[in-house]
Image: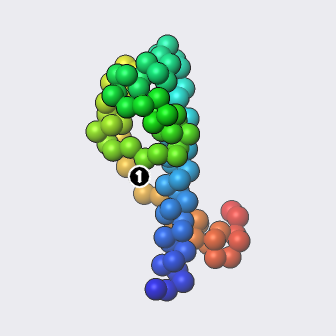
Amino acid sequence: MTRKKRVMERVTESAFDTFLVRLGKLLQQKRVDSGRTQDMLAVELEVTRSTVGNYECGRRNMTLKQLFELSQAIGKVLVVRLESPDYHTQINEVLYGDRK
């Protein structure tokens, strides 16, 4: 495996971890805004309260179906937007320490 490919895998994994944390914080905010506790949401989703907590902390990945069900439970519409990320900049930061 080339160095660039290893770096790309690290960048992708790091980006996904960041995504999970940001998504979790957003879900927590929307849950609180909806007036639900973690316990209430867990009952609606048929999961444990700790599972909801792990979603909100970004420690647990959820399926798209679970994310859809969660959005319905808190009265929100799930919108998915796909964009082209700038991985080149991220790879340069890892390889060369560049910050632009």
The image shows residue 60 at horizontal and vertical percentages of 47, 45
Q: Is residue 2 left or right of residue 63?
A: right
Residue situated in front as seen by the camera: 42 or 90: 42
Please tell me whether mark 1 sits on a helix, a strand or a loop: loop
Q: Residue at x 41, y 26 (%)?
A: 42
Residue drawn where x is 54% and y is 65% of the image = 11
Residue beneath the point at 48% across and 38% down: 55
Kind of residue sitting beneath label 1: Glu
Crowding at mark 1 (Cα within 10 Å: few <14, some 14-19, many 20+): few
x, y percentage for residue 57?
A: 56, 39
> Does residue 78 show up?
no
Instruction: Examine the rendering and report whether any part of residue 15 can be seen.
Output: yes
Q: Quadrant of residue 90?
A: bottom right
Find residue 10 and report its image quarter: bottom right
Residue bearing the label numbered 1: 83
Q: Residue 28 in the image: x percent, y percent?
A: 53, 29
Q: What colour scheme does the image use?
A: rainbow
Q: Position of residue 23 (x, y in %)?
A: 49, 40
Question: Where 78 falls versus 8 (above or below)?
Answer: above
Looking at the rendered image, the quarter that the C terminus falls into is bottom right
Compared across the picture, whether 88 is left or right of 64 comes to right
**Quick check: 25 left or right of 36?**
right
